[in-house]
Amino acid sequence: MDLRRFLAGRGGQLAFLTYQHASLVIQCVLLGVVLALVLAGLVYRSRAGAAIATAVASVGMTVPSLALLALLILVFGLGVTPSVFMLAFYATLPILTSAIVGLRSVPGTLVEAARGLGMPRWRVLATVELPHAWPVILTGIRVATQLVVGIAAVVAYVLGPGLGSLIFSGLARLGGAGALESALVGTALVVVVALVLDGLLVLLGRLTVSKGLR
């Protein structure tokens, strides 16, 4: 194995694939955050609705990524679109669960006090409940991000962007020149992306979570 020879002259390609991978993950997680918060906002006040949403999210996590990707190919074909749909799906599930748990854990006294000030329901959610539930929601976002970073490598099967192309091209050529190096470098860069994004989310938590809620 000659890792140095493999890396020589490939710096630009590796940087671009790493950027693609991170960008895809960030965009899909942001989409998942929006979807999860909207869904959680609709169901968290209902015990039955919250239970159903949590159960559906738990079941959704058991769906094999390759099976889901195969179904999406039938609808959207190859490329970025099925990749985004699949990753946004997996990103939404842990964030939805965390958002429901966080919102339902807000003390009722805070909610009643806000209502006593004449705040409408949407304002109570936006200014009281969501900020109080934010630490739990952020934990779900961290879980979702790590999940999506790993699953994002699979989208190489449908010609999706990212580091998966390095990994699977290497695995497909095992025994050939540079094959093992390609798979190892791709895997290592996926780990780097996961660590960097998690570090950024930890920093975001320190900046956005008040000391009283930590």
Image: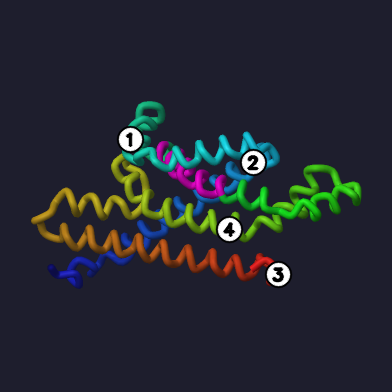
- Name the spot of residue 149 as percent of width and height, x first: 40, 54
Which residue is the site of mark 3? 212
Depth check, mark 4 against mark 3: the one in front is 3
Q: Nearer the viewer, mark 3 or mark 1?
A: 3
Name the residue type under label 4: Leu
Q: Position of residue 178 (x, y in %)?
A: 15, 61
Residue flagged by tag 1: what amino acid is it? Ala
The answer to which of 152 and 65 lies nearer the viewer is 65
Label 2–label 4 contact, CB within 8 A:
no
Q: Is residue 38 left or right of residue 178?
A: right
* Vertical arrangement, residue 48 with respect to residue 95, above or below: above
Q: Residue furthest left?
A: 175
The crowd level at tag 2 (other Cα within 10 Å; few <14, some 14-19, many 20+) is: few
Where is residue 123 shown, x and y percent of the image? Answer: 80, 47
| CB-based contact (under 8 Å), mark 1 and mark 2 | no
On the rendered image, what quadrant is the C terminus found in? bottom right
Which quarter of the figure has residue 190? bottom left
Q: Around disc 3, counting alpha carbons within 10 Å, would you say few (fewer than 14), some (14 to 19), or many (20 or more)?
A: few
Is the image coloured rainbow, by chain, by secondary structure, or in one colour? rainbow
Label 2, label 4: how far apart the Cα atoms are: 15 Å
Q: Any magenta on residue 93?
A: yes
Relative depth, front residue between 17 and 140: 140
Distance, label 3 to label 1, CA atoms, is 44 Å
In the rendered structure, the answer to whether residue 134 lies left or right of residue 64 reads right
Considering the whole magenta stretch, tell me its main secondary structure: helix
Q: CA distance from mark 3 to mark 2?
A: 26 Å
Q: Which residue is mark 1?
A: 67
Which residues lie in the magenta part? Answer: 82-97
> Which residue appears at 67% of the width and 53% of the height?
105
Q: Which comes before the other along the chain, label 1 or label 2?
A: 2
Residue assigned mark 4: 138
Which numbered disc flags the more N-terminal residue, 2 or 4? 2
